[in-house]
Amino acid sequence: MDRFRLYADAAHRERLVEARCGLLGGYLAPDADRERLQLAADFATWNVAFDDEYCDEGELGRCPGRFVRVLGLLQRSVEVPEEAVFGDRYGVALHDLRGRLEEFGPPEGVAAWAASMRGWFLAEAWKSGNVAEGRVPTLGEYSSLVLVSGSAEVWTVLSPLAEGYGVPGRVRADRGVRALTEMACWLLSWDTGLLSWRREQRAGGDGHNAIDVVSRTFGTDFDASVELALLLRDEVMGLFIRLRRRVLDERGSEVERYAGMLERLVRGGVDWAVGSRRYREETGPAVRVSEDPEALRTGAGGRIPREVWGPVGWWWLHDPDTRRRAGTS
């Protein structure tokens, strides 16, 4: 962090220290050796610092034209290992991470990581355009955006690399596995969004939060939006659990470790957020996390037409309960 000065000012640096960003790398790659764990921790720090300074709090994220140029050059920093092609602080730091990853990651794995970064940057460009126009996305749009924004999907590639195992392309391409991957990314982003609502409102708010999106989509007030956001979250979690059982039954050991990583992505992200000063406020979060497994509620999503979920509605086509009732496998 200090080597590349990944902070806007002294106050931002202090907030990053208090956020314990490196701990997120530990939650998401707990079986990595010391060197790889350090890389995961350093990437987590880059992740949070970039998200704060460039995407959410600084002026750059509110100027789509300028921001897209920076995002494009950051992507080239990921794609070109031979030399640092972008002198920006975040570009040089990202190039350093790419070089260190190449020391132990197989070429195809490193290439997959670079490709996943492109999706993240595209989502940030999309969000920047929305903010500039004062536009709050619908549930379907927001659900598509958060699959890749904030690095959620990047971690599904980086965590296996850090822990030293590969995920065959045929496994990632399986539609059931792909649905699990997307739901895990959605749950990570949705949960941290619920926990960060007060922080985002204090910073001015831009409508890109689960509570604001639910309010915009369904026309509900704050209290009703929080309740519905939690119900929708539980509905997706219930589907994730059901589909995970089916995928493990069908693919067995081939997907077991990857499925475990997706579970850690969901739980680890929440555990880090709950314990991080980044999400803690004196007045408390807008929602609180329950440790009671019986607190999981399902049924809300089933009453919402699949069309409302937009580009993520296809997840329910793989719901084992729906297939069982329809008499299909």
Image: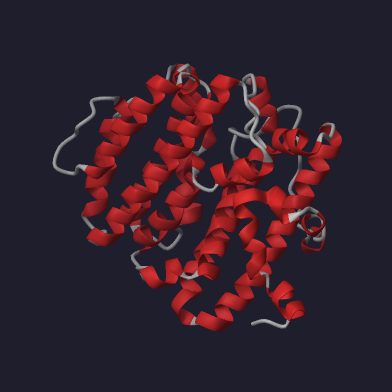
**In-front residue for pair 80/100:** 80
Q: Is residue 258 above or below residue 227?
A: below
Instruction: Tell me the residue at 37%/68% (across/down).
Output: 169
Where's residue 66, x and y in %?
38, 20
Instruction: Tell me the residue at 49%/18% (across/down).
Output: 11
Where's residue 163, x and y in %?
38, 62
Q: Is residue 15 left or right of residue 219?
A: left
**In-front residue for pair 244/159:** 244
Q: Is residue 296 left or right of residue 18?
A: right
Q: Is residue 49 above or below residue 153?
A: above
For the N terminus, give its image quadrant: top left
Q: Please indicate, yes or no, whether residue 2 appears anywhere in the rendered image.
A: no
For the C terminus, give its image quadrant: bottom right
Where's residue 9, x and y in %?
43, 17
Q: Is residue 207 above or below residue 226?
A: above
In the rendered image, the residue lying farthest to the left is 82
